[in-house]
Image (cartoon, grey):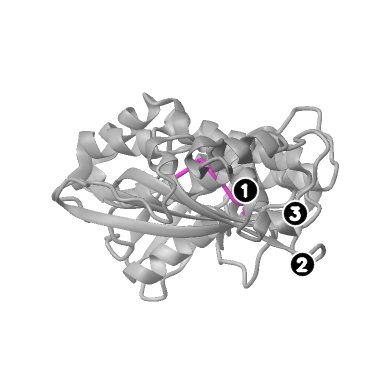
């Protein structure tokens, strides 16, 4: 007489007994890892769930529900295609977490949750995917901003370049704070949180196999802790904040100038640039003002709060090199003008394209 089904081993037990572990050392992503079946479930469980582990992911839903305090919410989305995937000071995974958090923080908001979507090329080494996920999970835990939902797709060999990551993030803005790109006013001051150009030069040096006497490391970091201190100390004095990523400081100031219908006067000697970054830019024929940053911010602040804001920023590890680099001026042409270290002046224009492609 056949044994009743409920007396045999459960399906879950049978699946686990027959399941082979991923070969993270030598294995490669194949199309079955994006097909929605058992192989895809194994990839997600053994790499992404392991790296990002939290209560929302453990629920196994196609979405995550969460409670938020009452108030104004911000949401951002971004894509990461940096080449190479691993660079001095970070990986595409940590960069995706930090970059998304920073977009939220520039509104003065407290980041709450992230999502992540992966497009992976067939043949991509599992060991590299595991490393990316681990650095992403480490960044998530370090910042206190969990990755609570995501998606994975695999495309045929040659249809992508290893792995691309898309993210989204949500956060809450403190009551009474409203930072907008059109809020700069003549007389306001411009503060940069630290040295510029580090990320772009670090990525380019790795990409081109360049070695310098002094190692150049990406500044990739999450700025929400620095921003929280700034908002707490003098939130009403902050007109706006931006992170100068692609296009660097030059593009950021031009974007603000055009949005606010003002001009800027900046001082080249006041702009913090590491000597090794300046030397590398000269060697590569790059202008540091156009080079991407991933752990710096630009704040336009009411003039009466400048000293207090600098003091607060310099007390934070990510703002120790904060500097007042210029002022907002009335200018119908919305020019960004710079007093050079040679005693002259020039217009700082933004580039028509990217000086360094695939930088984030």
Q: Relative to the observer, which residue lies in front, 72 or 357?
A: 72
Gap in Å between the C-alphas at discs 3 and 1?
A: 45 Å
Label 2 neighbourhood size at 10 Å, few (<14), some (14-19), many (20+)? few
Q: Position of residue 139 (x, y in %)?
A: 51, 34
For label 2, the SS is: loop
Nearer to us: label 3 or label 1: 3
1 and 2 marks in contact (CB < 8 Å): no
Image coords of residue 28 (percent x, y) = 79, 46
Tag of residue 5: none
| Coordinates of residue 93 in the picture (x, y in percent) | 60, 43
The secondary structure type at the circle numbered 1 is loop
Residue labelled with disc 2: 159
Q: Residue at label 3?
A: 162
Q: Nearer the viewer, residue 164 or 59?
A: 59
Q: Is residue 219 visible?
A: no
* Cα separation between marks 1 and 2: 49 Å
- Badge 1 or badge 2: first in the primary sequence: 2
Q: Is residue 294 magenta?
A: yes
**Principal SS element in the magenta part?**
loop
The answer to whether residue 313 is left or right of residue 39 is left
Q: CA distance from mark 2 to mark 3?
A: 9 Å
**Magenta part of the protein: which range?**
291-297
- Is the C-beta separation of discs 2 and 3 under 8 Å? no
- Residue 23 image-quadrant placement: top right
Which residue is at the front of the view, 16 or 307?
Answer: 16
Q: Is residue 319 above or below residue 105?
A: above
Q: Is residue 127 above or below residue 358?
A: above
Q: Residue furthest front?
A: 1
**Residue 342, label in figure:** 1
Identified at 36% across, 70% down, the residue is 259
């Amino acid at each position: 007489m056949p044994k009743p089904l409920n007396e045999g081993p459960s399906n879950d037990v049978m699946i686990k007994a027959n399941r082979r572990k991923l070969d993270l050392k030598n294995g490669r992503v194949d199309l079955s890892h994006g097909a929605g079946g058992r192989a895809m479930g194994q990839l997600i469980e053994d790499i992404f769930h392991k790296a990002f582990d939290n209560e929302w992911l453990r629920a196994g839903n196609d979405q995550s529900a969460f409670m938020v305090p009452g108030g104004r919410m911000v949401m951002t989305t971004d894509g990461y295609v940096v080449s190479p995937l691993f660079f001095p000071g970070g990986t595409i995974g940590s960069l995706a977490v930090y970059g998304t958090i920073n977009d939220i923080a520039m509104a003065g908001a407290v980041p709450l949750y992230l999502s992540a979507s992966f497009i992976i090329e067939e043949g991509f080494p599992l060991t590299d995917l595991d490393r990316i996920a681990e650095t992403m999970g480490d960044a998530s835990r370090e910042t206190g901003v969990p990755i609570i939902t995501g998606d994975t797709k695999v495309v045929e060999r040659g249809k992508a370049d290893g792995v691309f990551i898309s993210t989204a993030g949500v956060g809450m803005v403190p009551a009474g704070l409203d930072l907008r790109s059109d809020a700069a006013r003549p007389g306001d001051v411009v503060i940069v949180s630290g040295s510029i150009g580090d990320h772009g030069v670090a990525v380019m040096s790795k990409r081109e196999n360049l070695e310098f006497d002094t190692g150049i490391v990406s500044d990739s970091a999450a700025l929400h802790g620095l921003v929280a201190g700034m908002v707490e100390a003098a939130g009403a004095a902050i007109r706006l904040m931006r992170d100068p990523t692609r296009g660097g400081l030059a593009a950021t100031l031009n974007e603000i100038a055009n949005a606010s219908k003002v001009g800027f006067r900046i001082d080249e000697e006041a702009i913090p640039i590491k000597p090794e970054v300046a030397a590398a830019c000269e060697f590569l024929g790059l202008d540091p003002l156009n080079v991407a940053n991933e752990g710096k911010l630009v704040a336009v602040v009411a003039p009466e709060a400048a000293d207090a804001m600098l003091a607060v920023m310099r007390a934070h590890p990510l703002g120790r090199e904060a500097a007042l680099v210029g002022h907002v001026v009335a200018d119908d042409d919305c020019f960004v003008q710079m007093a050079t270290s040679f005693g002259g002046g020039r217009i700082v224009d933004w580039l028509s394209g990217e000086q360094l492609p695939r930088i984030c």
